[in-house]
Image (spheres, helix red, strand yellow):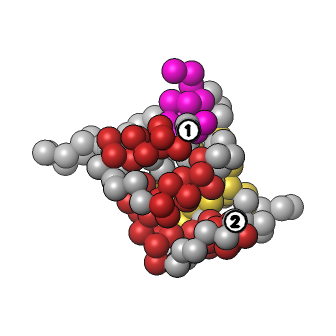
Amino acid sequence: MDAAKKDCPMQDLTREEVTQYLRRSGLRPTRQRIALSDLLFGKGGRHITAEALHEEAVLAKIPVSMATIYNTLHHFTQAGLLREVAVDGAKTYFDTNTSNHHHFYHEDTGHIYDIDTDEMKVIGIPTPPEGQEVWRIDVIVRLKDI
C-alpha cells in the first residue's frame, strides 16, 4: 500500500470495497453512507466541513439531512476513516488524511491545509499523568495576511 493510500484508506476504492471497508470498521453500509463516502474520498486528500459536504450532497442530488451529515462524519471519525480538526469552537473540518500531521489555517480565508511532516517536529512533550498516554498531538498554525 502506498503512503497516500495509507493516509486516506478509503481513497480510490470501488463501491463494493467501500461497503466491505465500512463493515470492517463496524459501520452499516447504508446508501447514504456509501454516497457520502463517494463525495468524501473520491477527490483524494481533502479537508471539508459538514456544511460544505451537505452542499456537495445537494448538488449531487443525494437526499440527506444535516443531522445525517454530522452523524456520518462523526461515525467515520470514530471508526478512524476521517480525522477531526477543530480550528475553533465554531468551525470543524474533517480530514481524509488520517496520518499524524499538522495544519496551517488561514484566519482570513478559512482555508486549511497540511503541513509537510518534514517541516515540523513537536519536541518537549510532557509526561502524561499515571495511567494515561499521549494519544495524538494536534498543532494548528494560524495564518493572517500582512
Image quadrant where residue 51 sits: bottom right
Disc number placed over residue 60 in the picture, else none = 2
Q: Is residue 102 above or below residue 123?
A: below
The residue that appears at 63% across and 55% down in the rendered structure is 39
The residue that appears at 53% across and 44% down in the rendered structure is 15
Q: Quick one: 73 or 98, which is closer to the camera?
A: 73
Q: Quick one: 73 or 87, which is closer to the camera?
A: 73
Q: Specify few, some or many for label 2: CA neighbours under 10 Å numbering under 14, 14-19, or 20 or more.
A: few
Badge 2 amino acid: Ala
**Is 141 contained in the magenta span?**
no
Instruction: Give the side of residue 122 with respect to residue 117, left or right.
Output: left
Q: Which residue is mark 1?
A: 14
Count the labels in the image: 2
Q: Please state the horizontal and vertical placement of residue 135, each as a whole percent of the image.
A: 32, 44
Work out which quarter of the rendered image holds the C terminus and state it: bottom right
Instruction: Give the side of residue 17 with respect to residue 91, left or right.
Output: left
The residue that appears at 56% across and 58% down in the rendered structure is 35
Q: Is residue 2 above or below residue 12?
A: above
> At numbered mark 1, what does the secondary structure look like: helix, strand or loop?
loop
Badge 1 amino acid: Thr
Q: Please state the horizontal and vertical placement of residue 18, each as a whole percent of the image.
A: 48, 43
Q: Please state the horizontal and vertical placement of residue 45, each as a whole percent of the image.
A: 64, 43
Disc number placed over residue 95 in the picture, else none = none
Q: Is residue 4 above or below residue 1?
A: below
Mark toward the start of the polypeptide (1 vs 2): 1
Boundaries of the magenta span: 1-12
Instruction: Give the side of residue 37 with respect to residue 134, left or right.
Output: right
Q: Is residue 4 visible?
A: yes
> At numbered mark 2, what does the secondary structure look like: helix, strand or loop?
loop
The residue that appears at 66% across and 42% down in the rendered structure is 44
Q: Is residue 117 visible?
A: no
